[in-house]
Image (cartoon, rainbow, N blue to C red):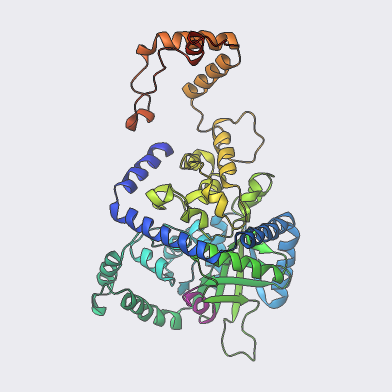
């Protein structure tokens, strides 16, 4: 099935899911209000955005040397570093680490990069039990669904659906629709897993090159348990998450949490620099970090598209997107939805596979207005739209350039250029268009599915002005 047809089918399905749309609208409105409440002083907000942008831009400029420094520091601290060019390589590396440690069960903290590599599926095929410990991820794991949001993965489900899901898998625990009781049930289920798991896997929000520190932001404590209770901890992250100094973290953390969930700070902020030491009572005996490229180096080669990699995964652009709030994350059909998904996924997977996502944008600019690191998302989406239909003029390192180009559409624009480049041709076209307006087709593709067809006026504005005695010059 062509990507356009599949995309339209997913959108149609999403638009007919009233329950999910109600959940999106309610939750997004709440997150927008909470974020706004955290930034009462606009001047202070803009200064913080400028600072966060500068930190991320500086790190991307120095990325090769910072990654080398990060590896040196982590290795000196006792953490083993692994490099993966592709998602497949990352999964293989993690499996080999688990196999060498004879690890059969593992608990996972929230990690979008592991969603990117489809790590759970890969490990389960090799008889390793994987349990998502984040409550939202745990819910969608039970439902066999991908995340619908990068921060709130189960945002599309209401309390009743979660209650029924828990009762289906854990009938012995009883049925309840009380949110606090459901949370306690999940805690009861997960606690034993934390205590007995052979390994834990987590993502990384920021990796500090100066000190060799892995920073994890979370609210539930599951990330802390996943990284300290098991004897083995494996962290996985994209290479763009590196920052230069430990002093870069406070401003990034400040704007990340406020932009994501409207919190002044999350409940937990974990800083991991080494495995358990002989005089310490807890912590893993071994820590590994997998640094994933997966097209990030290719994105970095383009001076304009490089801005994509500044993203700190707060989800603010998604929360404020008028398209996302109507269709939700699953309609995009990719790991990363919303405005950041429209920019990242076509570069990561190729325009021939996901270029159609760039059409899921109204160019309203809301995403750029709230992005904490000032990524010009509409500008990048527009650039990718151009790349998808015009391969000949581009030197960009993007797979699938020109793959969405349509002959009829390109011919129509060629005719438009011919008419508008010549005053004589334009006047001639205008005369025929007004006199032959009755021949205007009533069906103009998707435009007329919900709108009336566009029909020229009986007389042009210039002709009307002449009738009133105004000189057309």
The answer to whether any part of residue 298 appears in the image is no
Q: Percent position (x, y) of residue 8?
A: 37, 40
17 on left or right of 302: left
The secondary structure making up most of the magenta span is helix
Q: Which image quadrant: the N terminus?
A: top left
Q: Quadrant of residue 314?
A: bottom right
The answer to whether any part of residue 135 appears in the image is yes
Q: Percent position (x, y) of residue 223?
A: 51, 74
Tell me if residue 312 is in the magenta stretch. Answer: no
Q: Percent position (x, y) of residue 40?
A: 56, 64
Residue plotted at (72% across, 73% down): 211
Q: Residue furthest front?
A: 469
Residue plotted at (61% across, 61% down): 45
Residue plotted at (69% across, 46% down): 301
Residue plotted at (51% across, 82% down): 229
Q: Quadrant of residue 140?
A: bottom left
Look at the picture and state if 47 lies above or below 413. below
Q: Percent position (x, y) of residue 251?
A: 65, 67
258 vs 148, nearest the viewer: 258
Look at the picture and state if 63 lies above or below 422. below
Which contiguous range is marked in magenta?
219-229
102 vs 69, nearest the viewer: 69
Q: Which image quadrant: the C terminus?
A: top right
45 on left or right of 7: right
């Amino acid at each position: 099935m062509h990507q356009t047809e599949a995309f339209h089918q997913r959108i149609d399905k999403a638009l007919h899911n009233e329950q999910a749309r109600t959940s999106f609208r309610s939750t997004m409105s709440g997150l927008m209000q909470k974020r706004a409440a955290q930034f009462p002083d606009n001047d202070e907000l803009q200064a913080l955005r400028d600072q966060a942008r500068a930190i991320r831009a500086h790190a991307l400029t120095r990325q090769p040397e910072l990654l080398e420094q990060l590896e040196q520091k982590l290795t000196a601290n006792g953490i083993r570093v692994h490099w993966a060019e592709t998602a497949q390589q990352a999964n293989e590396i993690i499996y080999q680490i688990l196999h060498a440690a004879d690890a059969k069960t593992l608990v996972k903290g929230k990690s979008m990069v592991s969603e990117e590599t489809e790590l759970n599926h890969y490990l389960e095929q090799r008889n390793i039990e994987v349990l998502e410990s984040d409550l939202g991820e745990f819910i969608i794991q039970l439902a066999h669904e991908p995340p619908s949001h990068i921060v709130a993965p189960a945002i599309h489900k209401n309390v009743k659906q979660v209650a029924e899901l828990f009762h289906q898998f854990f009938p012995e625990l009883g049925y309840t629709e009380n949110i606090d009781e459901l949370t306690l049930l999940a805690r009861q289920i997960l606690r034993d897993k934390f205590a007995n798991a052979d390994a834990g896997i987590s993502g990384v929000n920021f990796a500090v090159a100066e000190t060799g520190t892995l920073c994890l932001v979370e609210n539930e404590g599951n990330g802390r348990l996943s990284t300290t209770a098991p004897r083995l901890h494996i962290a996985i992250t994209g290479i763009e998450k590196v920052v230069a100094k430990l002093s870069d973290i406070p401003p990034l953390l400040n704007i990340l949490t406020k932009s994501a969930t409207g919190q002044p700070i999350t409940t937990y902020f974990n800083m991991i620099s080494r495995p358990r030491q002989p005089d310490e009572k807890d912590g893993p005996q071994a820590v590994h970090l997998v640094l994933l490229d997966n097209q990030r180096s290719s994105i970095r080669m383009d001076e304009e598209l490089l801005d994509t990699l500044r993203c700190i995964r707060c989800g603010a652009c998604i929360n404020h997107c008028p398209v996302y709030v109507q269709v939700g994350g699953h309609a995009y059909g990719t790991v990363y939805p919303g405005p950041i998904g429209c920019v990242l996924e076509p570069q990561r997977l190729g325009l021939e596979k996901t270029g159609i996502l760039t059409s899921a944008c109204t160019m309203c600019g809301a995403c750029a207005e709230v992005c904490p690191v000032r990524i010009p998302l509409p500008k990048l989406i527009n650039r990718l739209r151009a790349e998808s239909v015009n391969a000949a003029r581009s030197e960009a390192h993007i797979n699938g350039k020109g793959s969405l180009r349509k002959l009829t559409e390109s011919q129509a624009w060629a005719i438009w250029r011919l008419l508008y480049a010549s005053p004589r041709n334009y006047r001639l076209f205008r005369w025929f268009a007004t006199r032959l307006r009755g021949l205007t087709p009533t069906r103009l593709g998707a435009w007329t599915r919900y709108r009336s067809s566009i029909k020229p006026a009986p007389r042009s504005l210039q002709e009307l002005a002449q009738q009133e005695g105004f000189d057309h010059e």
